[in-house]
Amino acid sequence: MEYRKLGRTGLEASVIGFGAEWIGQMEQAEVNAMAARGAAAGVNIVDCWMSDPAVRSALGEALAPARDQWIIQGHVGSTWQDGQYVRTRDMALVPAAFDDLLARLHTDHVEIGMIHYVDACDEFRAIMAGDFIAYMRELLAAGRIRHIGLSTHNPEVALLACEEPEIEVVMFSLNPAFDMMPASEDLEDLFGDYENVAGDGIEPVRARLYARAEATETALTVMKGYAGGRLLAADTSPFGVALTPVQCIHYALTRPAVASVMVGVETVEQLDEALGYEGATAAERDYASVLAGAPKHAYMGQCAYCGHCAPCAVGINIALANKFYDLAEMAVGDGAAPVPASVRAHYEAMAVTADACTACGQCEPRCPFGVPIPERMEAAAALFGC
């Protein structure tokens, strides 16, 4: 299992995480088997946003044999009222719901206390100025949470969170379909009309988010990596072609700042499909060929960091150079800001940097998206001052 730094937390998370959303449909033995299978494979991060007491108890029993192995993202603000899930900021209700979460998970803390489901910028600002963040600070001081995180589907909210040093992890909905969609305060918009999406490739606000999260070392953990399963079937995929779980996972893991993909699965067999990512070949991980050949919304002209351009005649890791260039260009903007030190350090640590490009052009025919690679290598060399 591959592990990545979880932002500034000092923790390392498995690239495959356990999104436990569907365990309410399972028998306890199945939940136990799924957690055990994940733990045996090295999965060490799990998300629990669910407020249903029965679901929390089932997860608590399943995690108990290896509790010390797990990084738990436990959500604050997810409550169970009159037999229903209710998202709330009502401080008369929030503490009791969090106490219940810890009790049912058989633990005295969660590693990441997630401010639950904030999709409106005004709501985020109110949280950061009011009683809710004060309560999160109390939990942090008491050791009942070890770090503060936030979950959102709106890249504008996630961008705001990246500017708050207290927030170290953002759980964000990320997949190649959502990456085309504009920011919205309504989750349902992400499942809306892809036919009217303007342009190709990643929507600019989302691109800025990935760059800013990388610059501020804010970890992204991924939800909805399969777009609620829509990407796994041609008739529901907005691209008109199906992707595999491995391809969806690889797409998410090639985005800047992403630490882990929290896969939502209903069976051990589906979990094994996701775990197959670790042993998958480059061809099995290849999302780029599928997207480039799709009848709808190919990412033409934009580097997807897929690596098809390799090998470079002089040894440049072109995909990595392009990623650092995009991160630096997004931060620099109109030239008023310097290249972030962290991005510069990563770029300069490359064995061969973009200035070594001879413009031979051998890479370009291999690019599925028609990216003008020598031009970008020249621009990268100029931006980094090589």
Image (tube, helix red, strand yellow):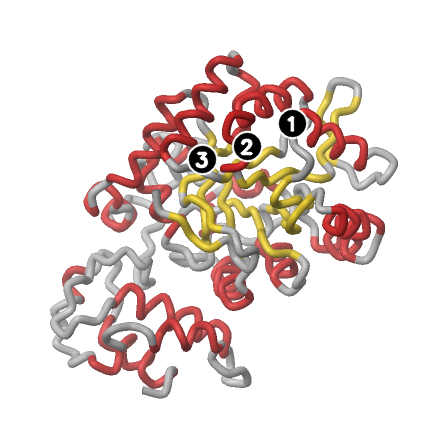
The image shows residue 210 at horizontal and vertical percentages of 49, 60
Is residue 57 visible in this depiction of the protein? yes
Q: What residue type is labelled 3?
A: Val
Residue for point 63% across, 29% down = 50
Q: What residue type is labelled 1?
A: His
Q: Please tell me how crowded label 3 is: few (under 14), some (14-19), or many (20+) other residues with Cα within 10 Å.
A: many
User: Is 30 drawn above or below residue 136 in the view shown?
Assistant: above
- Are circles 1 and 3 on residues that touch, CB within 8 Å? no
Give the side of residue 137 with respect to residue 259, left or right: right
User: Is 150 drawn above or below residue 322 in the view shown?
Assistant: above
Give the side of residue 383 with respect to residue 216, left or right: left
The image shows residue 302 at horizontal and vertical percentages of 33, 62
* Gap between marks 1 and 2 measured at Cα: 9 Å
The residue beneath circle 3 is 263
Viewer-nearest of discs 1 and 3: 1
Residue for point 67% across, 62% down = 164
The residue beneath circle 1 is 106
Q: What residue type is labelled 2?
A: Arg
Which numbered dot is residue 67?
2
Residue farthest along the right direction in this orientation: 92
Front residue of this view, candidates 105 and 235: 105
- Are circles 1 and 2 on residues that touch, CB within 8 Å? yes
